[in-house]
Amino acid sequence: MTQAKGYQGKTVIDFETSFGVVPSAGSRKGYSIPFMSNTLAATVGLTKDETLTGRRDPVEPGQGNVDVPGSLKVPVDAHNYGLHLRSMFGLPTTVVVASLLLNAAAAVNKGGGKVGLPCTAHGLASGAPVVIVGSTNYDGAYLLDRTTSTNELVIAATYTAETFAGDETVSLARQVVIDGVVRLAGGGKVGLPAVAHGLPVGARIVVDGTTNYDATYTVLRGTSANELLVTATNTAETVSDATATAAFYDHVFKVGDTMPSILAEKAFPAIPVYYIDRGLKVSKLDLSFGGEGVLSSTMIFVGAGEDDDTTQYDAAAVELPIVKFNQKDVSLTEGGVAYSNRVKTVSLSLDFGLETDTYTLNTPDKAGERGDITEGLLGLEGNLEALFTGTDLVDKAIDNTTSSLAVLASNKGYELEVTLEELKYERTTPPIDGPKGVLERHKFMPFYASGAANSSVVVRLRNEMYSLEQ
């Protein structure tokens, strides 16, 4: 017999429409997620039976209720992490990232096959994909060069003198080539050939350059590495060098009154056995910034029940592209002021205040399970560690001043930002631990009183997914 190996394991999650109920086969929308560890597991304790039988020996124990504790540790990335945010906050408010206008000024020859385009305070990062429209010489798709600066976009292009009118647009978007025979997939769907496109299910694409398919589409489940599956009238066509452009969107998550429940399948394909934990809600979230390597996040769950099977929950589960955020991608503002070369670490803990003493009388297949897991008050606290180079943070703690924090991870156009609009620091003056540099450490508590965002914590995720529920 072959021992199960961790590296072969998979985790698939799906959102439940009814608490603790596995969706029927035809309505499953599984996502195979990247993870570092999965400790979810149902437990049923044995209870001591003190019935007297005239013997000294213990009698057969009874069974307790079902508990489904455990955690998922996952990398913080630009696509899959949106699913986890949805499980904590529900569906976000989604808006397209607005296009920019070039300045009414001249292109600059930067040398070495690079051109500088004037665009004041554009806010785009090096490596970000952009699409330029409306110029005479520079329309097309580019990746911003590392020499891009605050007021200038630098692209790889042959320099041709041009003075812009100021109405040329620059959009944060990815553009891929559609080339080859369109596959007639049936059922009102077609497959557009796009080799190594890298676009996620849920992206919204604008197709241009075809005879029959120039339109706007949402990328569907069933999309593969070299094909974009969309809803369209089936018409035979061989496409040559058409394009599909996917804009970027900001997904804004805020504290709401309810949380969705999910299921998570823990797969051991070598056995094979597949355990499905149902009625899961995120009980706590731990998120830390600072150090080195890949950003990661740990979610602690509580659930209702567990099933097992010898076949997969969803053999066609979607695998979203993985674009990870690294610690080196992180920047921070405190009180609206950039804090560079000072803060070492910031950690945040969210306790969703779930009520777990909700065991109910159930049907035999759900005996001993929770009938629901209801939401309570959100608990928020965090810790900040910084080089002691000034007394501003200490003074805010002493004066009980309301401040704010915003932590931004940015990687080639993709972004994750956590904003705490109102918080207070616990008073702690820096200790002198020895001859080395002095550090200050502050516990803080975010809250909501009158912040413009109308939420004690706001998380913004930027990617090219128009929809997080495909």
Image: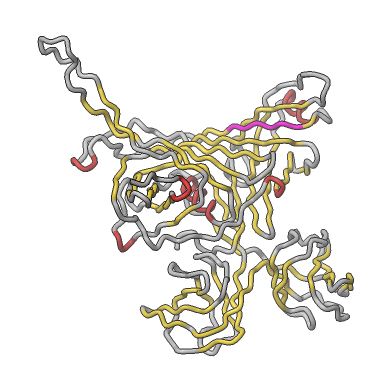
Q: Residue 341: give x, y in percent of width and height.
A: 80, 40
Q: Identify the residue at image location x=57%, y=83%.
A: 179
Q: Residue 4: give x, y in percent of width and height.
A: 39, 45
Residue 126 is one of the magenta-drawn residues: no
Whether residue 212 is visible, yes or no, is yes
- Residue placed most toward the observer, 336 or 31: 31
**Residue lying furthest left in this view?**
54
Q: Identify the residue at image location x=29%, y=52%.
A: 310
Check the picture and name the quadrant holding the C terminus: bottom left
Q: Identify the residue at image location x=89%, y=73%.
A: 109
* Magenta highlight range: 381-386
Dominant secondary structure (helix, strand or loop) of the stretch shown in magenta:
strand
Residue 211, located in which quarter of the rendered image? bottom right
Q: Is residue 426 left or right of residue 41?
A: right
Q: Residue 458: give x, y in percent of width and height.
A: 59, 46
Q: Would you place residue 94 above or below residue 259 in this image?
A: below
- Residue placed most toward the observer, 443 or 326: 326
- Residue placed most toward the observer, 404 or 135: 135
